[in-house]
Image (cartoon, rainbow, N blue to C red):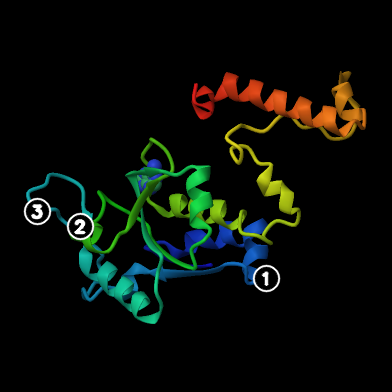
Amino acid sequence: MRVDIITIFPEMFEGPFGHSIIKRAIDSGIIEIHTHNLRDWSTDKRKRVDDYPYAGKGGMLMTPQPIADCIDELKSEREYDEVFYTSPDGELLDQPTLNKYIKYNNIIILCGHYKGVDERIREHYITKEFSIGDYVLSGGEIAAMVLVDGLTRIIPGAIGDEMSALSDSFQDGMVAPPAYTRPRVFKGWEVPEILLSGHEKKIDEWKLEQAEKRTLERRPGMMGE
Ligand code: ADE
């Protein structure tokens, strides 16, 4: 998958994309990420990318020209499956939605800033607005990172253990069951006996039971309650 990120802070992505699963996925060619500094497309002599809203009070808007020029250039080079825009008004990102997106080959993510973007960009360029939660962030970069991270780890081959992504919380509509590692007794607290029994079928049943119980306790909406 190729991801083109349009942002006024390209440096913000260096840290998160330079480590762990995303770095490995980039190094092995599973995902290709290109960040584009929006200011480079601005025809304004001071490279401005924001302006005052018509008939609005307070708060600047992202101007349409640099965004349109950047997206037009990218689209002249290849076809895109989706042009995302990070926005608290967008559709809430969840695991089933991420699972749908992994079929995409090329995507653009426009990171929102200020009071948002000129409506004509939303109408004519953006195909999907997404939110990472019902709160307002200071900009769209962190939301873009969340989308890229969530997508990368479910691309086949990104995680060493293929089964690991499939057994995540949410993958089967439930949160994950409790998990334990060594030592068997820590500060007097023991690992549940069943996990040491070697009885695979009973262990699976126990895990399912625990996952259901946890989901009902913590996220009842997830199981359609
Ligand atoms: N920009 C500001 N807040 C956001 C949110 N919650 N999700 C996505 N983009 C945002």
Q: Is residue 125 above or below residue 45?
A: above
- In this rendering, which labeled residue sits more in front, label 2 or label 3? 2
Residue at image position (12%, 44%) is 57
Q: Which residue is mark 3?
A: 54
Q: Which residue is mark 1?
A: 28
Asked whether the viewer can see residue 47, the reply is no
Amino acid type, mark 3 = Tyr
In the displayed image of the protein, which residue is found farthest to the front? Answer: 201
Residue 90 pos. (x, y %): 34, 45
- Quadrant of the image where one finds ligand 1: top left
**Which residue occupies the foreground of this view, 185 or 29?**
29
Label 3 C-beta lies within 8 Å of the nearest ligand 1 atom:
no
Query: What kind of element bears circle 1?
Result: loop
Residue at image position (62%, 32%) is 175
How packed is label 2: few (under 14 Cα within 10 Å), some, or many (20 or more)? some
Precedes in sequence: disc 1 or disc 3: 1
Q: CA distance from mark 1 to mark 3?
A: 47 Å
